Image (cartoon, helix red, strand yellow):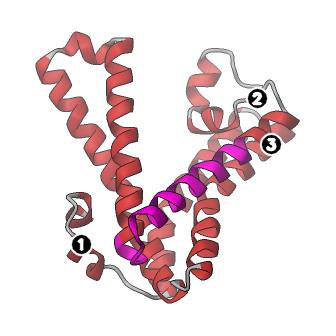
Amino acid sequence: MLLLGRGRAEGIAYFGNTRDSVLSALAPRLALWLVGGGLTIGYAPQPISGVKVLFALCLILLPAVVTHALAKRWKREGLWLRYITAAWWTDWVTLLAGLVVALLMALASPQLLESPTGELILNGIEFAYSLWLTWYVARVGLLLRRGQAVLLVLAIIGSLGLLAAVTALFSPDQRAWHEFLYPLLMQQQGGGH
């Protein structure tokens, strides 16, 4: 993970190219989804909570569906299992990078870290790194040209945005992903529906 996270292509060789390796990479995400889903339904046992939980599952699985379709179209289907395994594992590097940036910001200026500006800086750096890492892992894992990797990243972002827009269309007063991730915060703020 750390090799790919630092832009070292040889890191892709450390990931399996089997269904079991894909399931192993997916397991931590599903465990967090189950815990988050349990909290969401536990704090607000209403039908909308079930929708939020299903929405979160779609957000987890949709990038795999989109990238598989593109890999198949570009005749890279044989590389997809290793790619998605690496992609799911290296997503954790983004969180690690965010923690490192937050630590450095806290050491440099604790007030900055607690300010809206600091939050914007931290989220911006983490988002930019995540985009680059998604692009890089796609390029290395599926042996794509630069433009193809950009298209893959845009397809992932577009599909997630479309899913969020469809959800918002059917339930405009809900913020399903935010409330799924932060059920305790929403309850404390009186935002649980």
Q: CA distance from mark 3 to mark 1?
A: 37 Å
Q: Which residue is mark 2?
A: 174
Element marked by disc 3 = helix
Q: Is residue 180 left or right of residue 77?
A: right
Question: In the image, which residues are magenta?
Answer: 140-164
Name the residue rendered at 42%, 73% in the picture: 144
Question: Split into 4 quadrants, where in the image is the N terminus?
Answer: bottom left
- Specify the amino acid type for callout 2: Gln
The image position of residue 51, as x and y in percent, is 79, 45
Q: Is residue 154 magenta?
A: yes
Q: Is residue 35 left or right of residue 112?
A: right
Q: Within 10 angstroms of label 2, few (less than 14), some, or many (20 or more) residues? A: some
Name the residue rendered at 35%, 56% in the picture: 133
Q: Within 10 angstroms of label 1, few (less than 14), some, or many (20 or more) residues? A: some
Question: Split into 4 quadrants, where in the image is the C terminus?
Answer: top right
Element marked by disc 2 = loop
Of callouts 3 and 1, the N-terminal one: 1
Q: Which residue is mark 3?
A: 166
Q: Would residue 45 be visible to someone looking at this image?
A: no
Q: Residue furthest left?
A: 108
Q: Which residue is mark 1?
A: 9
